[in-house]
Image (spheres, rainbow, N blue to C red):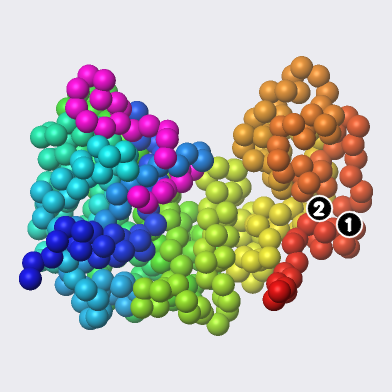
Amino acid sequence: MPMSLMQKLEILADAAKYDASCASSGGTKRDAKGGGIGSVTGAGICHAYTPDGRCVSLLKILLTNFCIYDCAYCVSRRSSNVRRARFSVDEVVRLTLDLYRRNCIEGLFLSSGIARSEDATMEDLVRVAKSLRREHGFRGYIHLKTIPGASDALIAEAGLYADRLSMNIELPSERALKDFAPEKSLAAIKRGMARTRANIEEAAEPARRAAKPNYAAAGQSTQMIVGADGASDAAIIGASADLYASYALKRVYYSAFSPNGHPSAALPHVATPLLREHRLYQSDWLLRVYGFALEEVEDAMQDGMLDLSMDPKLAWALKHRERFPVDVNRAPREMLMRVPGLGTRAVDKLVASRRSGRLRLADVARLTRGLGRARNFLTAADWTPKRLDDAHLESRLVKQPAQLALF
């Protein structure tokens, strides 16, 4: 008996939940005032949080979970005993438009297993986006997964209709890829990412903008499985830094290894894989947003692993107490960015506010929610913290685990 659309949606939306790359920040702000359907707005069926804190709701599905590959970490792998389904191009288009009209979503995140070949899969993904844009005037956000090994022409065409493109690097090292996904080629993945970067940069040239306006305006991203191969946190962050430098990525997304597709088991050296994933994201932010050098992030680790009991910014500060306290009225922005408890917005507000006069601790409190932590690492006009060499400082700042009451 043929599957209904809702049965397909149940299977293919569940299969897509393991893909983490779904933030839409950086996309072009479009609306339907001049005709068409949809918009890309700041308001938030999958809730994705952008780096600047906005929440967006996306229809996040696979075109199909049939796949010719047998990657050990993937729930849709060839040998996996899961229910299979496949959307037609028209079904995805209709589903996207219907959910948008009902105000359920503001965009589409579309990936796929490789059911026949790389080019056939990539062609179907492009057809979905092309139909939405050209035939239906859809102006909402579209994120397309590009397929390693697909033709350069198809990858180039994808960026004409998608706000963001992404191709999964899969694992931190080539050796891990050979162990867990021997049918995939790291060279093909990197070649595809390099092609996408070249297309984006070419479209940004003044002479090309008319031919390729807003080509993949939100850039490209990638996803890395962590915890499958035993790579250290230092190796993972180092690999990410190389990817940012080589392919001008907007984001590297980390996905905790889930044996058989379920986030349950963990490697012996990582008791809580989802917490480790969180710490990796925090380290990634230190590199991308807070201006930390790779060596500084690695310095916050112990034997190449992040401390799961505290965020890496606090770990770095506790290791370098000689750099603190920082004077909020005189310190340069890059040093304020290293104060635990101060985010980028708080730092910018502090820098702007001190032009009008010397800041007191109460002024800092009005500009940040993280004063409880930050006050230990900064001075103000009326405030100097206790000695930073206090042996009990770490225990005061790090929340200790406690046994929950049974009744």
Q: Which mark is residue 321?
A: 2
- Numbered disc 2: secondary structure: helix
Q: Report the residue at 36% width, 70% height from top.
A: 174
Q: Report the residue at 67% width, 38% height from top.
A: 334
Q: Position of residue 121 (x, y in %)?
A: 14, 58
Q: Is residue 208 magenta?
A: no
Marks 1/2: CA–CA distance: 7 Å
Q: Nearer the viewer, residue 97 or 125?
A: 97
Q: Amino acid at mark 2?
A: Arg
Given contact means CB atoms under 8 Å apart, are the residues at marks 1 and 2 in contact?
yes
Which stretch did the figure color magenta? 30-51
Instruction: State whether the magenta stretch is mostly helix, strand or loop.
Output: loop
Q: Position of residue 400 (x, y in %)?
A: 75, 66
- Does residue 1 lie above or below 310 as drawn? below
| Residue 8 shows up from this direction | yes
Q: Position of residue 54 (x, y in %)?
A: 47, 39
- Does residue 225 lie above or below 127 as drawn? below
Q: Is residue 33 magenta?
A: yes
On the image, numbered disc 1 is attached to which residue? Answer: 389
Q: Report the residue at 59% width, 43% height from top.
A: 291
Q: Amino acid at mark 1?
A: Asp
Identify the mark nearer the N-term, 1 or 2.
2
Residue 115 position by quadrant: bottom left
Q: Report the residue at 83% width, 47% height from top.
A: 376
Task: State which quarter of the image contains the N terminus.
Answer: bottom left
Q: Nearer the viewer, residue 406 or 367?
A: 406
- Numbered disc 1: secondary structure: loop
